[in-house]
Amino acid sequence: MASQQTTELRKGAQVPEPGLTEEEVVVRAVALRPLLRANRIKAAEDGSYSTEIHETFDKAGFYRLVQPRKYGGYEFSLETQYRVMVEISRGDPGIGWCLTLGTAHTIPLVSYFPEAVVSDAFGDDGLFIASHSASSRGVAVPTEGGYLLSGSWGYSSGVAHSTHAMVTAAVQSQGEVPELIVALLPREDYTVLDDWNSSLTMALGASGSQTVKIEGAFVPADRTVPFDWQATTFPEETIGVRSTGNPLYLAHIGPLYAGTLACIQVGAAKAALDEYTQIITTKKRTFAPQVERYKHPDAQLVYAEARAMIEAAEAVVYAGARDFRSLGERWLNDDHPALEEWLAVGNMLYTAIQLAHEATELLFRSVGSSVARKGVPLQDYFLATQMQKTQLEENKPHFYTSLAKAHFGLE
């Protein structure tokens, strides 16, 4: 059994608001919705949310939700993290994407990297924001004490306000299948290219998904770990569980990364429903009877069907967070869940994403041609889900078949 959780704080890292509750941070996220919507277009043009919004997020505690208390965080539940990110994404999916992915990588940092490295990453102020480009787009050349790392990692979502970057790279070797590692680099060791904003992308211009470029940076060996974060049943405890006693830091990224994306897509769908409601209560039907659309069964049916799908998707997201916690608690009590159980939670969350997409598509096609005009909010929410849909369609076959293989005992 893992060690009991420690409450000892890192020297210099203090919890900013010791009395902050999980309920209060969700309330804060809801209250920011008007501000985020007012900044929707500007943030997309700039490629990320502003410094002022970044400082607002920091003051609200959003960067520290799943950060261990020993490093100056709140160590709230995964469900609270998801509830906050749904609400931020309901304000604006692009801003939500940037914040959600920038904060989500706190969990694998704590879980897999040595404690000294983690402590240094949080620093004296306790602030850690990082992207993780999971695809191997670089090469790590072994050298004395570590690696020389070079490459370009696109789609590094959350990097705009980052303190660090995590990148996946192949270790250079001769005649062998290269080992994949994740390297952790401080901000001064990488360049963020100006290649992401609304003039360059179909949607999600505010997501801070710029390219990270690294040219021959030295990475000490202790700031690299094997990239085996989704094909394990954790036969031994992770560093994070040993250092905190919290099974959240087992960090099987199958369900964790799927849940992160699901929060954003559910938030986008909820924003689409808000906008659809606004349209049908202020716009009349083109054909008889020419009444406000909400008074006609056609709009009523669309509203009810979309709402049902969105609420079902949201319920699945929060259930996924609770299931992740339950699997971790079982593991902590020496009842180690099978790989199939971890994969099942992730696949459930991918299905929630699919429901959010279907609901947003229904809303988009049900209000007339006015949504085709650039800048219309409902169009932006629809395109945000369509942009992620391409990723879903690429990933889903791999994760779904992995679950089936695990169930039937196949390699």
Image: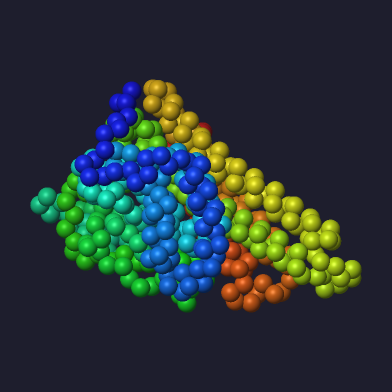
Residue 266 in picture, x, y percent from top left: 58, 52
**Relative to residue 33, is residue 246 depicted above or below?**
above
- What residue is drawn where x is 38% and y is 60%? 55
The quadrant of the image that shows the N terminus is top left
Q: How many marks?
A: 0
Residue that appears at 29% across and 38% down? 70
Left or right: 379, with 57 as reference point: right
Can see residue 253?
Answer: no
Residue at left 29%, top 31%? Answer: 6
Viewer-proximal residue, 342 or 11? Answer: 11
Is 26 drawn above or below residue 303 in the view shown?
Answer: above
Quarter residue 252 falls in: top left
Lateral position of residue 378 relative to residue 107, left or right: right
Please name the colour scheme applied to the rendered image.
rainbow
Residue 296, position in %: x, y? 84, 61
Check the picture and name the quadrant holding the C terminus: top left
- As displayed, is residue 216 above or below residue 310? below
Quarter of the image holding residue 285?
Answer: bottom right
Q: Residue furthest left?
A: 144
Rendering coords of residue 43 (x, y %):
46, 69
**Front-most of residues 273 and 192:** 273
